[in-house]
Image (cartoon, rainbow, N blue to C red):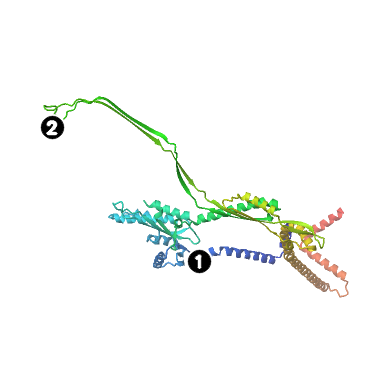
């Protein structure tokens, strides 16, 4: 289709359209565009056409009642869109919002450490602690609400009473109530993050002592204690599918060139994984000890000991030798002592091993392959006929060995490989015999390769048909209407000219009659004479009206004759 010609035709049609037709087409186009714009902007225009604006949105029913009560006191019109949204005329929005907020409404807003902006003298220590706890809960609620996809949150903290006894000491706990947005969902990581956030804000609070529930009362973050982690399970399933698909593609890619194409083999692999992660820590002691330190002590004494005073212990023996006591004779003495201490170092090797994400326990592969197709003459008709020939045992065994090597077959692990041979496309159903079979073969060779182009040709044919049956007749009809209107206009102009000629003829006859009456001529007078007289009379009248123009005209006539 020549688009330039089409555009030129459309331009020619629009230029030849009448004013009324152009107005109709333009009005129809504008109506369609206006309707589409109306559908797009209907919601926004519906919200703002009445002059109402949102005063408060997403507030609790109790706060909505307080706001409505205040508006009714001030006689301000309002409109309740839903349970938590109130609208007022736009000229009252900001004024009323400030006035209502000055009265502490809405009261359900989260209050944090702004409680300490005002100092109240005479407050007790207990009141200060309660105020701090309220401020801490409010700040945590604000922080949790800022996270996505949480719509509202409330945090409660339980601080134990301090005790001087260590055994009776209790740890703080916290509970969090979450309102999750419609269609939203918290992952296990987000829940763990909220627990850690709350625990880090309160001294001596651990994440295990933080409990979270949703608006339906269902506990969140408790799946890990029971061993169920949805994200981990999803990752394991995805890992298993991708691993199996990788093995299947490997088998099909290896066997495709052998069997005659990727459509001749189908492989399905099932892998059993062990997703239990094991962390092992082992210590190895070396039997060959190494001396770390050695200490030796040696004492040796020779000679005699000094004389000692004998006797009964007491005052006399302490005073010294007196009468009646005898000294013991010194005896010879020899003393030796030797001590050796050796410390051996016991060498130790500590090994910490973390298991992989998954361990293959068993691989099972099922492979289905197509056979061969040979052309043989038919015994009855003596025509060549394609016959299916299955693979023999040797070929199947060879394919089985290829598959085993491709997947890393391990007999000890319990792996299994099964190879089956079937006819994928039965010849009786695939290609009919005789003339129909030949036609089918010709279609496969010469028509099927061009099938992707047929859809574009079909679309082109539809557009051409639409042009011939809709656009062209419409343009032709518009041109015919234009021609008819033009012919009617020409006919009307011809009739007007004929009417003017008739009127001129009537005026001439009337002038002729008057001229005859003025000259007193009879009916027998020659018409040429009458015309001559009438012309002279007219010329005389024109000369009298504009003598200067007449003189110029006569002068130009004389000059033209002289030049000729």
Dot 2 crowding, Cα within 10 Å, few <14, some 14–19, many 20+: few
Marks 2 and 1: which is nearer the front?
2
Q: Nearer the viewer, residue 345 or 425?
A: 345
| In the displayed structure image, the side of residue 15 where residue 197 appears, left or right | left
Dot 1 crowding, Cα within 10 Å, few <14, some 14–19, many 20+: few
**Is the Cβ of the residue at disc 2 closer than 8 Å to that at disc 1?**
no
Residue 259 in picture, x, y percent from top left? 70, 53
Q: Quadrant of the N terminus?
A: bottom right
Question: Label 2 belongs to which residue?
Answer: 315
- Residue extending furthest top? 303
Residue 58 location, quadrant: bottom left
Instruction: Give whichever of discs 2 and 1 has the lower sequence position.
Output: 1
Residue 420 in picture, x, y percent from top left? 66, 57
| In the displayed structure image, the side of residue 175 where residue 561 appears, left or right | right
Residue 344 in picture, x, y percent from top left? 40, 35
Q: What is the CA distance from the residue labelled 2 to the residue labelled 1?
A: 126 Å
């Amino acid at each position: 289709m020549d688009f330039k010609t089409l555009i030129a035709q459309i331009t020619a049609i629009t230029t030849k359209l009448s004013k009324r037709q152009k107005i109709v087409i333009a009005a129809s186009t504008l109506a369609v565009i206006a309707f589409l714009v109306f559908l797009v902007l209907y919601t926004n225009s519906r919200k703002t056409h009445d002059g109402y604006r949102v005063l408060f949105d997403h507030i609790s029913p109790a706060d909505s009642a307080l706001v409505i009560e205040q508006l009714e006191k001030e006689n301000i019109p309002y409109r309740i869109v839903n349970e938590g949204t109130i609208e007022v005329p736009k000229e009252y929005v900001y004024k009323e919002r400030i006035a209502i907020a000055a009265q502490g409404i809405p009261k359900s807003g989260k209050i944090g450490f702004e409680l300490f902006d005002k100092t109240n003298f005479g407050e007790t220590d207990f009141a200060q602690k309660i105020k701090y706890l309220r401020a801490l809960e409010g700040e945590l609620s604000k922080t949790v609400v800022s996270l996505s996809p949480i719509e509202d949150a409330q945090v409660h903290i339980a601080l134990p009473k301090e005790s001087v006894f260590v055994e009776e000491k209790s740890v703080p706990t916290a509970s969090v109530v979450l309102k999750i947005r419609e269609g939203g969902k918290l992952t296990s990581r987000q829940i763990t993050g909220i627990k850690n956030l709350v625990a880090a804000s309160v001294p001596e609070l651990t994440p295990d002592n933080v409990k979270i529930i949703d608006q339906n009362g269902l506990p969140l973050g408790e799946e890990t204690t029971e061993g169920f982690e949805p994200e981990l399970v999803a990752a394991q399933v995805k890992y298993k599918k991708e691993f199996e698909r990788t093995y299947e593609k490997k088998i099909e890619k290896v066997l495709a060139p052998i069997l005659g194409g990727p459509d001749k083999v189908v492989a399905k692999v099932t892998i059993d994984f062990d997703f239990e992660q094991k962390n092992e820590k082992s210590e190895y002691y070396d039997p060959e000890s190494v001396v770390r330190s050695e200490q030796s002590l040696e004492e040796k004494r020779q000679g005699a000991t000094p004389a000692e005073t004998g006797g009964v212990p007491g005052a006399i023996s302490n005073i010294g030798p007196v009468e009646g006591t005898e000294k013991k004779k010194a005896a010879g003495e020899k003393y030796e002592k030797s001590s050796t201490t050796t410390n051996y170092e016991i060498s130790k090797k500590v090994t910490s091993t973390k298991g992989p994400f998954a361990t293959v326990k068993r691989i099972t592969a099922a492979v289905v392959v197509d056979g061969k197709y040979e052309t043989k003459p038919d015994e009855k008709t003596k025509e060549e006929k394609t016959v299916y020939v299955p693979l023999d045992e040797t070929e199947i065994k060879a394919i089985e060995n290829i598959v085993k090597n491709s997947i890393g077959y391990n007999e000890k692990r319990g792996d299994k490989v099964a190879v089956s041979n079937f006819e994928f496309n039965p010849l009786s159903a695939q290609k009919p015999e005789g003339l129909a079979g030949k036609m089918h073969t010709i279609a496969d060779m010469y028509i099927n390769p061009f099938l992707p182009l047929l859809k574009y040709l079909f679309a082109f044919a539809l557009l051409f048909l639409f042009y011939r049956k809709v656009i062209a007749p419409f343009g032709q009809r518009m041109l015919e209407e234009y021609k008819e209107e033009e012919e009617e206009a020409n006919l009307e102009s011809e009739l007007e000219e004929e009417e003017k000629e008739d009127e001129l003829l009537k005026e001439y006859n009337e002038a002729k009659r008057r001229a005859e009456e003025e000259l007193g001529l009879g009916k027998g007078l020659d018409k040429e004479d009458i015309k001559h007289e009438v012309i002279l009379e007219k010329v005389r009248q024109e000369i009298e009206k504009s003598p200067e123009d007449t003189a110029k005209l006569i002068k130009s006539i004389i000059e033209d004759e002289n030049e000729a």
